[in-house]
Each structure stands twice: as structure tokens, then as C-alpha cells.
């Protein structure tokens, strides 16, 4: 059994709290490791090491920071298969999907290599007579990231690439369900030349997170996870005067208009609904067919589900891996009975799929005639269950999407450019796909939902990430001839 320890001051540090959490291989159901869970003292030690490292790192030149980021990018690229294997071993997603996660995380590092350009300020010569004004952006100091189980490489990279490029020290509190990838990232940062203490990993649960929120030396918190925790961390962090960006859960709708290509839409719904066993914050969980497209679309989706191979993520040819824990698998399956009991039609029941004998597996499920009052619609299920809510018109479909409290991502499938353009304007959701089911923005843009899917003012990564991890300062300067100086108590006006 592997022991998974903290990474403090550039080395593995065994936990002393006496508490640990089990880590499973979800494909076998066997426990493979135990992760140390930090107490308050261990979090303080991690933050102290980060504070010390941040003093020099904030003074490291932009050229030096960019050089480290380029080296880190090369190492990530060279070790992408190793990273993917670590993700699959503890998360369960299939290897190709894990490799995709690594690739999308790597994009954020590539963006951050541009830091010498990205942190350029503005300069106004002669803003007033003899006066120049310019702006600079400075790091915050120590910033923390608290990340979910479903993207153990990509989400930490969303945060740490920009945070470190901006001159901060970054403390990561990864998910305790699949904690090992964070340690490989730490080793690669070190190999890339990042000074010890600039990237720290402290494993833990609520105890560790609460201490990061409370700690006076942690200036900002980036969180990605479920909505109740996101809301609580946002409220607690901002009450202590910290910057907080807290991304929460999702219920992503895919509207299919009557003119859409049925095969294209069915391929997209199956890919985005069941990829990573539905454990993606940008997964499609509700399909909203408008009008007569419903029946052919449901038939096409059901036909594709029949061909999905469910199994270990390491098995070649597997489409869908297991869920993260046995409890989560059972909770997800419970929605099928709840939906049927509330009057929905279970078209495909994933419990009846051909599944491996051990491990936390559940097949893909399709539930038709779902309505907003049902728990299968209201709750974020975070599993391979696709609901269908039929609507008669575009306006009704739009109203359904806009009434949902979650607003992370959404998609519209149509051949009508005018309808798509109207949707992009009117839909109240942070990320919109037009014939794209999982519209995760490329790294040059920023990622974030609206409403209960994000608490805070800044989205994650890209330009908004740079703003989040820096403070703006504006300098007004003049070099007057002392001979022309005099006392003037009036408020300085521009001349
Ligand atoms: P989670 O909220 O249970 O855990 C996220 C992190 O918070 C983990 O590090 C965990 O240790 C910590 N945590 C859990 N409970 C806590 C508590 N009470 N107090 C303080 N910290 C706590 O989420 P999860 O199950 O790991 O991930 C799945 C969720 O994340 C889903 O809701 C999914 O939609 C969401 N998610 C959202 C996005 C997004 O970009 N909006 C991206 C990925 C995942």
C-alpha cells in the first residue's frame, strides 16, 4: 500500500497528524494507497515554507520565470503518458481521456510562458504637463488552490501556471480521492528549476481547507468543486478579506433544434454525456430536443449507448471507466429509480449493462420525459446519466436553460446561424458551445460559469487568471526643476 505524503520545501514530507484517507483503484475496487491528511500545524508549516520562497520568487525576473515555465512545459509534454497513467490509476477515466486532460492542462502552461508579454503595463507619457503615469501588476504573495477529484492534473494547472508565472508561491490542496498526480507535478516543477517552496502540496480534507481559509499569510483562494463547498469557501474567504474565485457544480443542457443533424447531435450527446463516466463539470447532463427531433434523437443516442464498452481505463478499446467510489456509484444509480418513480421513462438502464465483476462500474443510462420538478433533473448527478427534457419551441428550451440555478456550460445544435446567434446572446450561462458539446475555452480565454456555478468576480485561467493572481498599481511620476517648486494646497489638477 502506497503512502501519499505532502510536498513541502521541495521534498516529500510524511504526515504527522495520524490521520489518513483511503485511495482506491476504482477499476478493481481495491485500496491502493493512503493519503496523509494534514492538521493545522502541518498546513502552517507548508504556508511558512511558501511565504519564505515567495520573497525571492516575486523578485525573479520575468525572463527567469518564463524560462522555468518553458522547461516545465517540456517536461509535462515528455511525461504526459506517465501523468495520464497516474490519473487513470486513481480516478479511473480511460487513458486517452486522461491524456486529453493532461493536454488541456499543458495549454495553460503554454499560455503562462508568455508572462513577459502578458504582464506589460500601460504607460502614458505626459499624462499631465511634465507628469508620466504607468501601471504595473504585482504578485499577491502566497495563494492557495483547492481542487476536485475529477481533473487531478488539469485543474491544478489551470491555477498554478498563472499564479507562479505572476510571481506568487502556490499551495495546492488536491482532492484526497486521487492525490498522487499532484506529487508528480511537484517533481516536474522542481526538475524545471522552480525554487523549492514556490509549489507546495498539502494533502487533507476540511481541516486543511479551513486552515488555508483562516491563515493570515494566504492572500487568495482558488477553488473548484461542488457548489455547497464553493459557496462556503467564497463566503468564509471573502469575510476574511481574501480574494476568492470558487467554481461550483453544473447541470449542462444541450439544446437540439429540429433542423440539427441527428447523427451529429447524437454523437455529441453520447461523447459529452458519458465521457469520463459523466464526471466532468462540463459534461452534458440534459438533452433538450425541440419538437419532432426528439424521437429520432433518442433512438440514435440509445443505439450508440449499446455499443459503449465499459471497463478498466487501462484496457485498450474501453470507452468508459468506473466511477470514483462505490458510494458515488450507488448514489448515481439511485437517480434511475427516483426518476422512474417520479414518472420519467428509463430508456436505457446502466445497471443492466455488461460490467466488470469488481470495481465501481455503472453503465450509461438514458432517461426520457424528465421534468424540472424531478430530482434527476434538479440535482447534479455527476455520473453517466443523460436526462431528456422535451420542449416544443426554441423559446421554451431557452427558458428551461435560463431557469436552472446552475450555469456552467451549455450547447446548441442547429444548422441555423440566426438561431445559434440568438442563443449565444440570450442564454444566461458562462460558456456556450455552438455545435460544440463541451465548450471548455482555450487557454487564451478564461473559464467560468455563472450563477451557482461560480462565486466571485473572476473566471479561471487566461487573462482573468492573471488579474486574479496580481494586484494593480498605478504610478504617477514627475521630475520637476526644484527652482519652479512652490507650496500649493489646492487639489492637484491636470494641466
Ligand atoms: P468537492 O466539493 O467534494 O471537493 C472539492 C475539494 O474541496 C476537494 O479538495 C475536497 O477535499 C474539498 N472539500 C470537500 N468538502 C469540503 C468541505 N466541507 N470544506 C472544505 N473543503 C472541502 O468536489 P469533488 O467531488 O471533488 O468534485 C466534483 C465537483 O466539482 C462537482 O460538483 C463538479 O461539477 C465540480 N467541478 C466544477 C468545475 C468547474 O469548473 N465549475 C470543474 C471540475 C469539477
Image (spheres, rainbow, N blue to C red):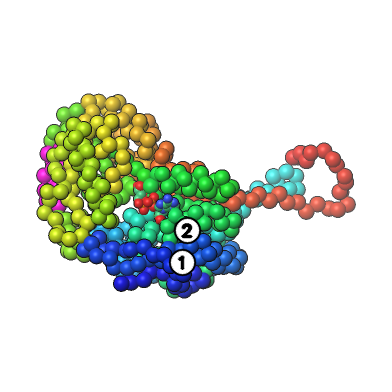
The quadrant holding residue 309 is: bottom left
The quadrant holding residue 409 is: top left
Residue 219 place in picture, x, y as percent? 57, 54
Question: For disc 2, does the CB lie below 8 Å from ligand 1?
Answer: yes
Alpha-carbon span between mark 1 and mark 2: 11 Å
Residue 457 place in picture, x, y as percent? 50, 43
Name the residue that disc number 2 marks. Answer: 208
Asked if the residues shown at circle 1 and circle 2 are in contact, with their CB atoms under 8 angstroms apart, the answer is no
Residue 326 place in picture, x, y as percent? 25, 55
Which sits in the foreground, 159 or 75? 159
In the rendered image, the quadrant that contains the C terminus is top right
Q: Main secondary structure of the magenta part?
A: helix
464 with respect to 251 (left or right): right
Residue 254 forms part of the magenta stretch: no
Name the residue that disc number 1 marks. Answer: 17
**Can residue 369 be seen from the camera position used here?**
no
Residue 186 place in picture, x, y as percent? 43, 68
**Can residue 405 be seen from the camera position used here?**
yes
Up-down relation of residue 341 to residue 25 (above or below): above
Q: Which residues are magenta?
A: 298-308
Amino acid at each position: 500500500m502506497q503512502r501519499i505524503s505532502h510536498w513541502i520545501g521541495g521534498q516529500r514530507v510524511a504526515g504527522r497528524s495520524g490521520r489518513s484517507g483511503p485511495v482506491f483503484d476504482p477499476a478493481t475496487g481495491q485500496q491502493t494507497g493512503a493519503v496523509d491528511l494534514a492538521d493545522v500545524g502541518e498546513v502552517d508549516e507548508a504556508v511558512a515554507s511558501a511565504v519564505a520562497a515567495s520573497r525571492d520568487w516575486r523578485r525573479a525576473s520575468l525572463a527567469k520565470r518564463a524560462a522555468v515555465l518553458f522547461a516545465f512545459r517540456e517536461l509535462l509534454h515528455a511525461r504526459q503518458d506517465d501523468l495520464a497513467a497516474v490519473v487513470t490509476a486513481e480516478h479511473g477515466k480511460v487513458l486517452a481521456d486522461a491524456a486529453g486532460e493532461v493536454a488541456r492542462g499543458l495549454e495553460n502552461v503554454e499560455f503562462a510562458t508568455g508572462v513577459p508579454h502578458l504582464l506589460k503595463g500601460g504607460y502614458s507619457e505626459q499624462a499631465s504637463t511634465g507628469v508620466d503615469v504607468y501601471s504595473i501588476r504585482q504578485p499577491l504573495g502566497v495563494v492557495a488552490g483547492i481542487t476536485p477529484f475529477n481533473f487531478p492534473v488539469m485543474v491544478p494547472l489551470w491555477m498554478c501556471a498563472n499564479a507562479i508565472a505572476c510571481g506568487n508561491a502556490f499551495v495546492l490542496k488536491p482532492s484526497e480521492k486521487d492525490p498522487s498526480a499532484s506529487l508528480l507535478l511537484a517533481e516536474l516543477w522542481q526538475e524545471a528549476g522552480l525554487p523549492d517552496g514556490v509549489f507546495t502540496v498539502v494533502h487533507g480534507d476540511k481541516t486543511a481547507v479551513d486552515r488555508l481559509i483562516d491563515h493570515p499569510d494566504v492572500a487568495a483562494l482558488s477553488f473548484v468543486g461542488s457548489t455547497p463547498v464553493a459557496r462556503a469557501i467564497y463566503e468564509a474567504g471573502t469575510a476574511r478579506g481574501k480574494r476568492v474565485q470558487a467554481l461550483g457544480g453544473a447541470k449542462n443542457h444541450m439544446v437540439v433544434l429540429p433542423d440539427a443533424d441527428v447523427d451529429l447531435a447524437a454523437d455529441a450527446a453520447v461523447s459529452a454525456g458519458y465521457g469520463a463516466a459523466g464526471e466532468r463539470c462540463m459534461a452534458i447532463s440534459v438533452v433538450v430536443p425541440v419538437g419532432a427531433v426528439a424521437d429520432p434523437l433518442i433512438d440514435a443516442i440509445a443505439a450508440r449507448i449499446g455499443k459503449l464498452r465499459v471497463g478498466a481505463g487501462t484496457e485498450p478499446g474501453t470507452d468508459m471507466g468506473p466511477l470514483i467510489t462505490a458510494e458515488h456509484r450507488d448514489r448515481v444509480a439511485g437517480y434511475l429509480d427516483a426518476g422512474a418513480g417520479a414518472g420519467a421513462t428509463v430508456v436505457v438502464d446502466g445497471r443492466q449493462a455488461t460490467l466488470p465483476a469488481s470495481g465501481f462500474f455503472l453503465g450509461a443510462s438514458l432517461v426520457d420525459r424528465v421534468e424540472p420538478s424531478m430530482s434527476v433533473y434538479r440535482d447534479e448527478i455527476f455520473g453517466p446519466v443523460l436526462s431528456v427534457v422535451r420542449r416544443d419551441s426554441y423559446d421554451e428550451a431557452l427558458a428551461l436553460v435560463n431557469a436552472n440555478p446552475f450555469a456552467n456550460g451549455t450547447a446548441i445544435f442547429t444548422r441555423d446561424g440566426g438561431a445559434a446567434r440568438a442563443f449565444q446572446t440570450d442564454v444566461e450561462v458562462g460558456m456556450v458551445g455552438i455545435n460544440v458539446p463541451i465548450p471548455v475555452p482555450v487557454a487564451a480565454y478564461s473559464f467560468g460559469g455563472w450563477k451557482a456555478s461560480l462565486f466571485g468576480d473572476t473566471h479561471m485561467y487566461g487573462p482573468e487568471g492573471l488579474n486574479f493572481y496580481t494586484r494593480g498599481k498605478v504610478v504617477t511620476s514627475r521630475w520637476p526643476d526644484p527652482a519652479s517648486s512652490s507650496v500649493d494646497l489646492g487639489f492637484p489638477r491636470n494641466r
